[in-house]
Amino acid sequence: MKTSTLLLAATMTFFTAVTQANDEHSRLPTLSAGVSETYGLVAGKPLRFQIAVEHDAVLKISSRHFAADSSKNNLMAAVLRDPQGNVVATASDDNGHFSLEQDVQEGYYQLEVAGNSISGSADENGRSYSLNVAFE
């Protein structure tokens, strides 16, 4: 009886974890090929995105700012995780222009973007960025 109870508890824990992971995927903003909408850097609040990879490819992601906006002193970092949650690529830049490139296989990847503006400027436009995503 004890073994079956433990097995049932382990199975329930596994299915709960899978359900939570699937729920998290469905709640994350999705990035697809092209230029994303505009996001803002907020210190201590990284943004996470889902990237659905349909076939083996080279995934290229770079951050970009509007031509009139200064990205100087915008510390940005990106972490790409594979479908199992392993870190497969990282990139960072002190001036808000990170770029990463990674061979990927079919599955759901997560990108986390974090940063902070150290310019001390009250101008929030300098903290705005978008992401350029390409599959090759």
Image (cartoon, helix red, strand yellow):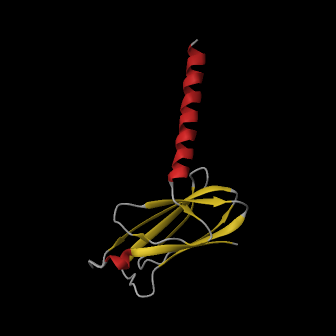
Quick check: 121 left or right of 17?
Answer: left
Q: Is residue 112 above or below residue 64?
A: above
Q: Is residue 122 left or right of residue 92?
A: left
Residue lying furthest top: 1
Task: Say above or below: 36 vs 106.
Answer: below
Q: Quadrant of the N terminus?
A: top right
Quadrant in which the C terminus is drawn: bottom right
- Residue located at (66% from left, 60% from top): 53
Q: Residue at x 37, y 75 (%)?
A: 127
Q: Residue at x 60, y 49 (%)?
A: 84
Could you tell me residue 52's position as x and y percent? 63, 59
Q: Position of residue 90 (x, y in %)?
A: 53, 66
* Image location of residue 80, percent across then percent down: 55, 62
Q: Between residue 49 and residue 104, name the one nearer to us.
A: 49
The number of callouts visible is 0
Residue 20 position in % (x across, y down)? 52, 42
Q: Is residue 109 above or below residue 67?
A: above
Q: Residue furthest front?
A: 37
Residue 105 occupies which quadrant of the picture? bottom right
Kindly indicate the quadrant of the structure image that contains residue 65: bottom left
Query: Which residue is situated farthest in the right direction here?
Result: 55
Residue at x-position 45% and y-position 87%: 67
